[in-house]
Amino acid sequence: MARKRRGLSAEDKALWSRVAASAVPMHPARKPDDLPLPEPMLKPPRPMAPPPSPLPLAELRIGGRTLGGPAIRIDLSPAPPQTVHAQPLRMDHKTHRQMTRGKLAPEARIDLHGMTLNIAQPVLTRFILQARAEGRRLVLVITGKGREGGPDAPLPVRPGALRHNVPHWLHMPPLNQVVLQIRPAHRRHGGEGAYYVYLRR
Protein backbone atom coordinates (compact mmCIF):
# COMPACT_ATOMS: atom_id res chain seq x y z
CA MET A 1 0.00 0.00 0.00
CA ALA A 2 1.49 3.39 -1.02
CA ARG A 3 2.17 5.88 1.74
CA LYS A 4 0.18 9.13 1.62
CA ARG A 5 2.42 12.12 0.90
CA ARG A 6 2.51 14.50 3.87
CA GLY A 7 2.53 18.27 3.24
CA LEU A 8 4.72 20.85 4.94
CA SER A 9 4.00 21.56 8.57
CA ALA A 10 3.37 25.08 9.83
CA GLU A 11 6.88 25.19 11.28
CA ASP A 12 8.41 24.19 7.90
CA LYS A 13 6.40 26.85 6.07
CA ALA A 14 7.57 29.56 8.51
CA LEU A 15 11.19 28.50 8.08
CA TRP A 16 10.91 28.56 4.25
CA SER A 17 9.37 32.07 4.37
CA ARG A 18 12.38 33.38 6.32
CA VAL A 19 14.84 31.79 3.90
CA ALA A 20 13.03 33.18 0.85
CA ALA A 21 12.93 36.69 2.34
CA SER A 22 16.67 36.66 2.94
CA ALA A 23 17.55 35.55 -0.61
CA VAL A 24 19.51 38.08 -2.73
CA PRO A 25 19.33 37.97 -6.56
CA MET A 26 22.67 37.12 -8.25
CA HIS A 27 22.13 39.70 -11.05
CA PRO A 28 19.80 42.44 -9.71
CA ALA A 29 20.40 44.78 -12.69
CA ARG A 30 19.47 42.21 -15.29
CA LYS A 31 16.04 42.50 -16.77
CA PRO A 32 14.05 39.62 -18.15
CA ASP A 33 14.73 40.98 -21.66
CA ASP A 34 18.51 40.60 -21.09
CA LEU A 35 18.28 36.86 -20.61
CA PRO A 36 19.88 34.83 -23.46
CA LEU A 37 17.47 33.45 -25.94
CA PRO A 38 17.32 29.68 -26.18
CA GLU A 39 19.24 28.16 -29.06
CA PRO A 40 17.08 27.37 -32.05
CA MET A 41 16.21 23.74 -32.39
CA LEU A 42 18.13 21.84 -35.01
CA LYS A 43 16.24 20.78 -38.08
CA PRO A 44 15.23 17.15 -37.97
CA PRO A 45 17.43 15.00 -40.22
CA ARG A 46 16.08 14.19 -43.61
CA PRO A 47 14.91 10.62 -43.90
CA MET A 48 17.44 8.44 -45.71
CA ALA A 49 16.49 6.56 -48.81
CA PRO A 50 15.72 2.93 -48.04
CA PRO A 51 18.53 0.50 -48.95
CA PRO A 52 18.03 -1.61 -52.05
CA SER A 53 16.20 -4.80 -51.31
CA PRO A 54 18.51 -7.83 -51.11
CA LEU A 55 18.24 -10.72 -53.48
CA PRO A 56 15.89 -13.46 -52.36
CA LEU A 57 17.74 -16.22 -50.53
CA ALA A 58 16.57 -18.72 -53.08
CA GLU A 59 18.77 -16.98 -55.70
CA LEU A 60 21.93 -17.13 -53.60
CA ARG A 61 24.11 -20.20 -53.66
CA ILE A 62 27.56 -20.70 -52.14
CA GLY A 63 30.07 -20.83 -54.95
CA GLY A 64 27.41 -19.72 -57.43
CA ARG A 65 27.44 -16.81 -59.82
CA THR A 66 26.22 -13.32 -58.94
CA LEU A 67 24.12 -11.37 -61.46
CA GLY A 68 25.57 -13.32 -64.34
CA GLY A 69 29.17 -12.51 -63.32
CA PRO A 70 31.98 -14.94 -62.54
CA ALA A 71 31.82 -17.15 -59.46
CA ILE A 72 33.13 -15.56 -56.28
CA ARG A 73 36.41 -17.08 -55.08
CA ILE A 74 37.89 -16.39 -51.65
CA ASP A 75 41.67 -16.69 -51.25
CA LEU A 76 42.51 -17.46 -47.65
CA SER A 77 46.20 -16.73 -48.04
CA PRO A 78 48.81 -16.13 -50.77
CA ALA A 79 49.84 -19.15 -52.80
CA PRO A 80 52.92 -20.90 -51.36
CA PRO A 81 55.15 -20.07 -54.37
CA GLN A 82 54.41 -16.35 -53.90
CA THR A 83 55.21 -16.53 -50.18
CA VAL A 84 58.45 -18.44 -50.75
CA HIS A 85 59.62 -16.20 -53.61
CA ALA A 86 59.10 -13.15 -51.39
CA GLN A 87 61.89 -14.31 -49.09
CA PRO A 88 65.26 -12.58 -49.56
CA LEU A 89 68.00 -14.44 -51.41
CA ARG A 90 70.56 -15.79 -48.92
CA MET A 91 72.44 -18.32 -51.03
CA ASP A 92 74.90 -17.81 -53.87
CA HIS A 93 73.18 -16.17 -56.83
CA LYS A 94 74.66 -18.49 -59.45
CA THR A 95 73.84 -21.62 -57.45
CA HIS A 96 70.33 -20.31 -56.89
CA ARG A 97 69.81 -19.78 -60.63
CA GLN A 98 71.00 -23.31 -61.42
CA MET A 99 68.81 -24.76 -58.67
CA THR A 100 65.59 -23.01 -59.75
CA ARG A 101 66.21 -24.06 -63.38
CA GLY A 102 66.36 -27.69 -62.28
CA LYS A 103 70.05 -28.10 -63.19
CA LEU A 104 71.11 -29.17 -59.69
CA ALA A 105 70.21 -32.71 -58.67
CA PRO A 106 68.86 -33.01 -55.11
CA GLU A 107 71.15 -35.09 -52.89
CA ALA A 108 68.24 -36.53 -50.90
CA ARG A 109 64.47 -36.45 -51.08
CA ILE A 110 61.47 -37.15 -48.89
CA ASP A 111 57.85 -37.65 -49.93
CA LEU A 112 55.32 -36.33 -47.40
CA HIS A 113 52.41 -36.70 -49.80
CA GLY A 114 49.47 -38.44 -48.12
CA MET A 115 50.68 -37.88 -44.54
CA THR A 116 48.67 -35.97 -41.99
CA LEU A 117 50.12 -32.75 -40.58
CA ASN A 118 50.78 -34.35 -37.19
CA ILE A 119 52.84 -37.10 -38.78
CA ALA A 120 54.53 -35.05 -41.51
CA GLN A 121 56.10 -32.38 -39.26
CA PRO A 122 58.26 -34.70 -37.10
CA VAL A 123 59.18 -36.77 -40.18
CA LEU A 124 60.31 -33.63 -41.99
CA THR A 125 62.27 -32.38 -38.97
CA ARG A 126 64.13 -35.68 -38.62
CA PHE A 127 64.90 -35.80 -42.36
CA ILE A 128 66.29 -32.24 -42.53
CA LEU A 129 68.46 -32.62 -39.42
CA GLN A 130 69.82 -35.95 -40.65
CA ALA A 131 70.60 -34.51 -44.11
CA ARG A 132 72.42 -31.61 -42.44
CA ALA A 133 74.40 -34.00 -40.24
CA GLU A 134 75.41 -35.97 -43.36
CA GLY A 135 76.73 -32.79 -45.01
CA ARG A 136 74.10 -32.57 -47.76
CA ARG A 137 73.27 -29.15 -49.23
CA LEU A 138 70.27 -29.55 -51.56
CA VAL A 139 67.33 -31.76 -50.61
CA LEU A 140 63.88 -32.14 -52.13
CA VAL A 141 60.70 -32.15 -50.04
CA ILE A 142 57.67 -33.48 -51.91
CA THR A 143 54.29 -32.31 -50.58
CA GLY A 144 51.91 -32.83 -53.48
CA LYS A 145 49.70 -30.06 -54.85
CA GLY A 146 46.67 -30.94 -52.74
CA ARG A 147 43.06 -31.22 -53.79
CA GLU A 148 40.61 -28.33 -54.00
CA GLY A 149 37.23 -28.47 -52.27
CA GLY A 150 34.36 -29.31 -54.55
CA PRO A 151 31.76 -26.76 -55.67
CA ASP A 152 29.34 -27.97 -52.99
CA ALA A 153 31.79 -27.56 -50.10
CA PRO A 154 30.14 -25.53 -47.30
CA LEU A 155 33.24 -23.39 -46.72
CA PRO A 156 36.23 -22.45 -48.90
CA VAL A 157 38.92 -25.06 -48.39
CA ARG A 158 42.59 -24.23 -48.80
CA PRO A 159 44.08 -26.88 -51.07
CA GLY A 160 47.36 -28.52 -50.14
CA ALA A 161 47.72 -28.27 -46.36
CA LEU A 162 51.23 -29.75 -46.54
CA ARG A 163 52.23 -27.38 -49.33
CA HIS A 164 51.24 -24.42 -47.14
CA ASN A 165 52.69 -25.71 -43.86
CA VAL A 166 56.09 -27.05 -44.95
CA PRO A 167 57.66 -23.58 -45.54
CA HIS A 168 56.33 -22.47 -42.16
CA TRP A 169 57.85 -25.50 -40.44
CA LEU A 170 61.19 -24.93 -42.16
CA HIS A 171 61.30 -21.40 -40.70
CA MET A 172 60.61 -22.60 -37.17
CA PRO A 173 63.17 -23.88 -34.63
CA PRO A 174 65.09 -26.11 -34.87
CA LEU A 175 65.03 -26.20 -38.68
CA ASN A 176 65.52 -22.45 -39.15
CA GLN A 177 69.07 -22.89 -37.85
CA VAL A 178 70.03 -25.28 -40.66
CA VAL A 179 67.88 -24.13 -43.62
CA LEU A 180 69.39 -21.42 -45.82
CA GLN A 181 66.86 -21.14 -48.66
CA ILE A 182 63.51 -22.56 -49.77
CA ARG A 183 62.23 -22.40 -53.32
CA PRO A 184 59.51 -24.19 -55.33
CA ALA A 185 60.97 -27.07 -57.28
CA HIS A 186 61.45 -27.08 -61.04
CA ARG A 187 58.83 -29.08 -62.93
CA ARG A 188 61.31 -31.89 -63.55
CA HIS A 189 61.52 -32.36 -59.77
CA GLY A 190 57.83 -31.99 -58.93
CA GLY A 191 56.98 -28.38 -59.73
CA GLU A 192 54.46 -26.79 -57.38
CA GLY A 193 54.12 -30.05 -55.46
CA ALA A 194 57.68 -29.95 -54.11
CA TYR A 195 60.28 -27.63 -52.58
CA TYR A 196 64.02 -27.29 -52.92
CA VAL A 197 65.55 -26.87 -49.46
CA TYR A 198 69.13 -25.58 -49.49
CA LEU A 199 70.93 -26.25 -46.23
CA ARG A 200 73.69 -24.33 -44.48
CA ARG A 201 77.20 -25.72 -44.26
Image (tube, rainbow, N blue to C red):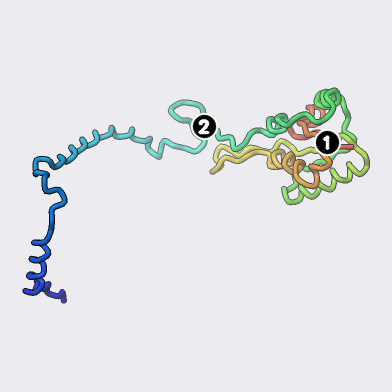
Asked if residue 170 is positioned above or below residue 46 in the image, the reply reads below
Q: Position of residue 31 (x, y in %)?
A: 9, 43
Of the two numbered discs 1 and 2 in the rendering, the one whose residue sits closer to the viewer: 1
Q: Going by the image, does 159 lie left or right of 30?
A: right
At 7% from the left and 70% from the top, the residue drawn is 14
The kind of residue tagged 2 is Ile
Q: Position of residue 139 (x, y in %)?
A: 85, 36
Within 10 Å of the Cα at label 2, are there few (<14), some (14-19), or many (20+) other Cα atoms? few
Image quadrant of residue 81?
top right
Q: Which residue matches tag 2?
A: 72
Q: Going by the image, does 167 lie left or right of 62?
A: right
The kind of residue tagged 1 is Leu
At 85% from the left and 27% from the top, the residue drawn is 92
Residue 102: tell me if it is visible: no
Q: Nearer the viewer, residue 192 or 92?
A: 92
At 12% from the left and 59% from the top, the residue drawn is 23
Asked if residue 72 is positioned above or below residue 19 in the image, the reply reads above
Query: What element does badge 1 sit on?
Result: strand
Q: Going by the image, does 151 lie left or right of 118?
A: left
Image quadrant of residue 124?
top right
Q: Which residue matches tag 1?
A: 140
